Amino acid sequence: MTLDDLISSELQITNIRVELPVSSNKVIQYVDIKIDTEKVGGQALTRASRTLAVVLDRPRVVRRSLEIEVHLCYENILRRRWRTDGPFSITPQDLLSASSQGIENEEEWFGKFGKLTIIVGFKTTHPLEAISQRNGSPEPADGRRLTPTTESILRDCPHFRILVMGKTGVGKSSLINKTFGVDDAIVAHNQVGFADINKEIYSKVNPHFVLHDSKGFEYGDDTNVKIVRRFIEERRDAPRITDKLHAVWLCIDIPIGGGRFLETGIEEFLKLKIGGKLGGVPVIAVFTKYDLLIVHETRLLKQRDPGISKEEVTNLVQQNANTKLQDACVKPFESFVQGRVPHITVSTETGYEDHLSKLTHITYLHVRDYLSDASVVTAMAQRASARVKIQASIEVGRRSTSVPLEGTYPNSVSLEYWARLAASVNFPGKTLQQCIDVIHADIIAVWRFNDPQGYLSSDKFKAMMSNIIVSDKDPSTNLIAGVSLVSGIAGIVSALSGPAVPIVLPIATALVLARWVYDVYQQTAFVLRHLMTYIIDLTLILQNIFWLQALVPDCPLSRRIIKMGVRAYQGSTTKRILSFKIDKHLEGVSFHVGPDTTLNTIEELIKSNIIETTEMLKHRETFSHLNNVRDDEAWES
């Protein structure tokens, strides 16, 4: 990549972080940053912080003349002296080395200045911010574009911030890696028994996730309880939602061989929470390594009765393990917290994926009650629960968000894209393509696939979607006609598990926009039917893609997986049933009087077709034979 390439790509700087080594005797107090002649900066939110991140109030486009200067103010904790250092200069030429480090539209540049690391976060023009620039979707005459609700949410809260606590070996790394789809054990780099709670741990694989790690509470040591309390209080008082702590996972070993379940430090921490000293931040107790309890009970049972059948072992082991879990963990914990701290038992091993799905769901619900916008980013960051993705998509569609009109601050417009589809105050005068562009952007933003090629926001995928919703249902053209969604996924996987052959979609699934999208929004049954169907079809197709992508979590999204998801949905009974139910809804819609019940109908139809993790686990044997999902192919196969 040349400097000209960098400039033409219109990279936008979004944040700048400075980091000192964990072993440093210096702590950052504040930084002053100059971008060209404009001064920005930030002050450390926590004491003894060796990391400070500054999120820019608006992105700065990288120009050839760009100059960045960073001045650092720090305190030497041994000598109790304040010092300043800098300036540290960064030029566009320096940023060239960041091109290979990006995930999706977000990239980072790492610069070393002695022991100081400066990280510049930037992105290319994002589909969410380029809707009005798409071909065939001109800027409206009034100068306003339809702004995705998720864009304003991410502007205020770009990351889900979580604190994970627990002693070494409790399973924090695998829990984080599996839940958030990261491919490196990001808490395992800390020395045994040591963790810097103030350090912000990012993953290049998941840009909407920030981790804080804390060691467990050792017997007789109340120091860490004080450190954790101070950290949570300081984050609680942070003025910006992005800097607040959004959730805490307290990881506790299941005592398989006996021993004390709640150490003194854990009890002291829980007392702070149930006593209201930590504020409203959700704390969720996670009882880890349930699989080891199963293994232990299996060994005991076979020792007592070597001749027992496999079926009897399975049933009795489950019963015995759950009885011990209740006696050793659940009952004493519930007695101590009196229902004020939720808990869940998990394993990160294969076959227990529903545990992580439930943990994600509990976390999402509690974060939603605490900080609504942060819960949407929670859903974006997690990779374990399709249900949470769908709930957050509906939440985004349901809410009313006030956003600035372009170029006319501080004027604003209220967005209620799903809430009043039958009588929208935002859609009149817009083409239906503009309407579906903003709806499409919001939905795919919540699912947040690893889609570096931007397939899901591409014109070809949108064209495919625009034709899917009006395609005739001819059972003779369907590979798997007359089946449920989950059986449809299993069927398409089974049918395509042999030698790789291109996936041929029905002829109605053209790759040019259907004619209806060029119409102008009107309060008619025709328009409402198409918008309702687009929302429902897109959401359920993304659900299919979510489960197919789970088969190859280490691979970026491919067109083949997208086409498999589309094919499975088109061939299912669900598609035809939903079409019938939408028509029934339209028979009772009034466009001029009474409440608009359309969103309630959309929510009901989507939620009635959620595929739970337990359902997918029943088809594990089918998925294990898939050997070509990693392959890709052209759209027009």
Image (cartoon, rainbow, N blue to C red):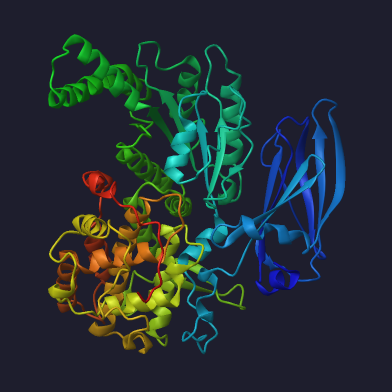
**Viewer-proximal residue among 595 and 427:** 427
Above or below for 146 versus 283? below
In the picture, measured across the screen, residue 99 lies left or right of residue 535, that is: right
Residue 181: x and y, percent? 45, 46
Residue 318: x and y, percent? 21, 25
In the picture, the quarter occupied by the N terminus is: bottom right
* Residue at 15 percent of width and 68 percent of height: 577
In the picture, measured across the screen, residue 544 lies left or right of residue 553, that is: left
Residue 104: x and y, percent? 53, 60
In the picture, measured across the screen, residue 95 lies left or right of residue 170, that is: right
Q: Quadrant of residue 296?
A: top left
**Viewer-proximal residue among 465 and 167:** 465
Residue 496: x and y, percent? 27, 60
How many marks the image carries: the answer is 0
Above or below for 245 versus 336? below
* Residue at 40 percent of width and 71 percent of height: 439
* Residue at 39 percent of width and 10 percent of height: 259
In the picture, the quarter occupied by the C terminus is: bottom left
Above or below for 58 versus 432? above
Would you say residue 170 is visible in this rendering? yes
**Viewer-proximal residue among 403 and 450:** 450
Q: Quadrant of residue 283?
A: top left
In the picture, measured across the screen, residue 582 lies left or right of residue 114, that is: left
* Residue at 67 percent of width and 48 percent of height: 53
Residue farthest along the front direction in this orientation: 499
Above or below for 602 versus 189? below
Would you say residue 600 is visible in this rendering? no
